[in-house]
Amino acid sequence: MAIFNAKDRVIECKLVYYGPGRGGKTSNLEYIYKAGKKYAMSDMVSINTKGDRTLFFDFLPIGLGKIRGCDVKVQLYTVPGQQKYSSTRKLVLKYVDGIVFVADSLEIRRKANVLSLKDLQQNLAAQGEDVFKIPLVMQFNKRDLGDKDIPIMPVDLMTRDLNSKLNAPVFEASALKGTGVAETLKKCLVITLQNLQKELKWTE
Amino acid sequence: MSEVLLSGRLRFLSLGDLFQLLGGNNSTGVLNIRSTYAPNSGVIYFEKGNPINASNGPIQGMEAIYSLFGWCDGSFEFLDQPIKVAHVIKKGRMEIILDALRMLDDGEIEKLGPPSFEEPSLIRTGMDKVGEIEGIKVIKGPFVNYAHILEEEDYADGESIVKQGGHGKWIWVILEGVVNICKETSSGLLTVARIGEGCFVGTITALSIREYARSASATTAEGHVRLGLLDTEYLSREYSSLSPDFKMLLLSLDARLRQVTDLVVALSIKGPLNEKLMKGKKVILKKGAPEKKAYKINAGELCVLGESKKGPLTLLSLQQGDIFGNLPFLDLGHEPGSASVMASEDSSVDELNALFLQEEYERLSEVFRNLVFNISTYIFMTTRMAYHLHEKR
């Protein structure tokens, strides 16, 4: 549920990048932060959680326009994958508005993807959210590694594994290079805001 | 006096949530935090939504903020107050939150909260020195609301506030200082509890019409103490408006506290324990069972069986009119989570509507609810002390 700051007329919505460790969540955020630095409203916070860094920053995307006279501010987070970081996970997932699931295309990470998605479903359920209802975009990351003869999974196999029930919009990406990063974020923002308007019974 | 703008319990709104709330609101003021499990209160200063300084006892600044993230249970108040302290914290609030939570999960911040009986902190707080005042941890209560205080009274160090066996219906709330609750025993005066700010002297039984003697304990001031005399008439009116079941619950809680206190005395003077209580009884509610219901006793004799590391320990007996079972709004450290209930063959019990009791609890005035919360904390801490003495016996 987005936060309305009536005083400053700002709607804050929260997008969380979820996925298996070292799958490219932080690369996504780092790319967005660098590319959109002029829109960023805060420095990027980087916490050295073991296995994976936890990142946070908020920014004011242009081109989204105003909703009911309010600016839309977006908070972006990554979640630490390791089980023991439950306090961080709980805080990050609280009132989450939209999710980008970053799946790793490497063959050896097939199981890790599935486990992480299950983990997401459970953690959302603990916050009273449903993985099938929350705005979610799927990103198949590290596609470029296929060109270097590193075994990666075909897209239809990953779709079957991860997206056969969810039917979320899918983007192929190479987050290190920035390919597909903006498209993923944009789609997630659009469906998140659509969902907010629907939830609040707003009609344009 | 500065105005309270926001108050509540950390169990419901954690420090991380509070930071975000005050941050999003660009609030300026002082956040006070108090936990029953900490010897002092914590203070965080906010300017335009960002924390700029903090203290937790002797710890200051950033380190104090991190340590306060370990307070998972407690009450907070945000006060509208001009800030005069130095601006020593430069980190942004989101970084502080995420860093603190990582440290909490990595075990770098000590967690304070409802203790379990097994917790080693028992030793650290020095419970093993029962009888020696320095050894017993001070119990603290929620913040004091001055609305129902008739008069303030000051006591000097060592001065007696209430005498054991004396009569009187007054209830005080501690505004400043520490009060010792003592029992006269065959081997001298024994301190069974030390209570501080926000705790009450006197019990709810004093509000019922029954003739009442201060059976419980003598209390004396430790250092300078300031008490607030509560408007007993107001509290009595509220008491008489309660449902019969809720009144029964309150009296039953008082009886529990009296019995566990007597148990602590018996254990510390190495007196006889009432081990016969278990005889001829069968377990009707097993420790840790997923019991959801609460019951009142119509007939028979029941007992509550706890367990220290040394083995089972009979905590208290229950009779007609007493209440037991799952009361989720009270944490006594007894059944169903941490103790079993045994009953004689001829016992009969009725199920209570626990939801009604809970609703009634939530409807209580703040000061009354604090009184009830206070008794349950005393019971919890006294039971904990009994276990510890039992282990040493």
Image (cartoon, coloured by chain):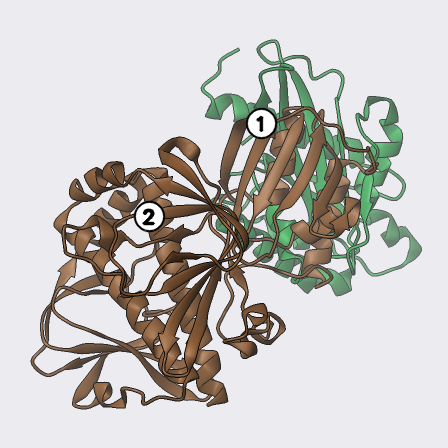
Chain colours: A green, B brown
| Tally of numbered discs | 2
Q: How crowded is mark 2: few (under 14 residues within 10 Å), some or many (20 or more)?
A: many
Amino acid at dot 2 = Ile
The reply to whether residue A92 is visible in this rendering is: no
Would you say B283 lies left or right of B54 here? left
- Between the C-alphas of marks 1 and 2, the distance is 44 Å
Residue A16 pos. (x, y %): 67, 41
Would you say A20 lies left or right of B242 here? right
Q: Which residue is drawn at 67% across and 61% down?
A: B110
Answer above or below: position of B148 versus B371: above
Secondary structure found at label 2? loop
Answer above or below: position of B212 versus B144: below
Answer above or below: position of B313 versus A5: below
Amino acid at dot 1 = Ile
- Residue B52 is tagged as none
Q: Which residue is drawn at 33% across and 54% down?
A: B202
Q: Mark 1 lies on which chain?
A: A
Residue B275 pos. (x, y %): 27, 89
Answer above or below: position of B300 versus B55: below
- Residue B171 is tagged as 2
The quarter of the picture where residue A182 lies is top right
Would you say B43 lies left or right of B239 here? right
Q: Which residue is drawn at 66% across and 36% down?
A: A15
Look at mark 1 in the image and give the residue it sits on. Answer: A3
